[in-house]
Every structure is written in structure tokens, then in C-alpha cells.
Image (cartoon, grey):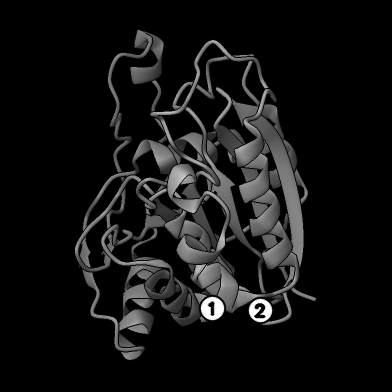
Amino acid sequence: MISLPSLFLSHGAPTLPIDPSLPSAEFATLAASLPRPEAILMLSAHWGTTEPVASISTHPETIHDFSGFPRQLYEIQYPAPGAPEVARRAAALLSDSGILTHTQPHGLDHGAWVPLLLMFPHADVPVAQLSIQPRQGAEHHFRIGRALRALRKDGVMVIGSGQITHNLYTADFSAHRDDADPLVTEFTDWFESRLAAHDIDALLDYRRQAPHAALMHPTDEHLLPVFATLGAADDDYTLTIQSLGTFQRSLAMTHYIFGSA
């Protein structure tokens, strides 16, 4: 079997499935362009633990981990089957690499089920979720990805879900789509140029090297999943970028697909 690509998705607002002004159709376009996975291992910005935890749930619940949104959003269910064997395999790979990992049942938070609902609306691809460690940085998550590389040859798509820029304090919710703060563009241009150059060292040091890094990510849990999916990619990965625009001036939505050369 060929190795599947690893993906980083900017999952945007929870309202993506119900707000026609948001770029929900682009998620389906992306899914249609990719090989269909036998299972998915998802790392979301919204499940953080001290040490990695892999969910062995056979029927993960749909977690509505947000408040203040329209009622219809809370009525959405994403009944994808779990992938407990994928979770156990991921935990074993991480432990073999010296990263202590636990297993327990856990549902799918909105960083997982919202993009998956848009990409695989029939909920027919088994999903396991792996937690991130918000208090550990880019290098830790890159190591996690490296340990998970073997899964891609087993039909498992490794997906990180977060946001390429995420500062809600600077967001202007009256702004129009694509009315991006120039500082956002400077950050994303730097990040994407380093991805294209395969400059792993610079990317792992992004807090110091990237322009406006602390402004784009006051805390970096929404960016950490990209380092895991980058780690899971081949050394000579091909890079595909799907830009969905910038919202509220400071929230850029961009997907990165790391394919095999």
C-alpha cells in the first residue's frame, strides 16, 4: 500500500457546518483530491493532556465543547466508528520511541468532528484521536509525528487540526473575509516558505524566528498539530497548500498537505 499523505487542517469556527458564508465546501474538495484512508488518527488543538493519550473508544461521542452558538449546532452528531486498534498501534509506536503514552476512551471534540463531517459526511471512516500536550512545544510534537510515520503505510491518515493563526483577542468580528491584517500575511508567508524549503530547524524554532509569532499564537496549542503532521511526513515530502482565506482580520485558515515525492 502506498503511504497516505499527512494533513494539517485549519478547522475554523464551530459554525462551519451551518454557516454558508464560511468555506465548508473546500473541505469536501480537499477530501475528494486525496486517497481514501482506511482509518484516521486525529490530533486536535482541543484535546490537551500532560502526556499523550490515544482514544480507544469504539463509538466516540460527538463532543460539543463550545457555548453560545445556535441550537442546531448542538444537535449535530458525527457517529463515525472508533479505531481502537489504530489507537493502540499509535500508543505502541510512541512508547517504542520513548514517549510514554496512555490509552482510554474519549470522544471527538469539535476540532476533530467539524472538519471530518465536512470531509467525510457519511461518517464511514473509523477515527481515533490522539491528544496534544499544550505545555510542550514544537519539537515534542515533531517527535510524535516521526514515531507515527509507519501508520501511513497501513492506510491510516494522520491529520492535525488547529489554526495557522489563532489570536481571538485581536479578531475583529465585523471584518470581511480576506481583510487580513498584514502581520498575519507576514507570518503565514514565512511559515509557508519554510515548509516549502523543508527547513525543519527554523520551523521548530518558529517562536523565535517567525515574524509576530507570539502575536499570531499567544498560546500555541492551535499550531502544535502541524508539527506532528510534519513529523509524520516523508523527509522529501511534497507540499500542497489550500488557502481558505483570513477571517476576522487575524484568523487565517490554511490547509497543508504533506505528500510522498
Q: Residue at x 52, y 50 (%)?
A: 125
Left or right: where 63 falls relative to 252: left
Identify which amino acid the numbered label 1 is placed on.
Arg
Left or right: where 256 falls relative to 32: left
- Residue 228 visible in this rendered orientation of the protein: yes
- Residue 75 visible in this rendered orientation of the protein: no
Say what secondary structure mark 2 lies in. Answer: loop
Of discs 2 and 1, which sits in the foreground?
2
Q: Local crowd at mark 2 within 10 Å, few (<14), some, or many (≥20)?
A: some
What whole-number distance in Å separates the C-alpha atoms at marks 2 and 1? 8 Å
Q: Residue at x 28, y 60 (%)?
A: 56
Q: Residue at x 44, y 81 (%)?
A: 147
Please report whichever mark, 2 or 1, sits nearer to the chain's N-terminal start: 1
Above or below, 156 against 14 in this view is below
Left or right: where 102 falls relative to 126: left
Above or below, 190 against 138 in this view is above
- Mark 1 and mark 2 in contact (Cβ < 8 Å)? yes
Say what secondary structure mark 1 lies in. Answer: helix
| Residue under numbered circle 1 | 149
Q: Quadrant of the C terminus?
A: bottom right
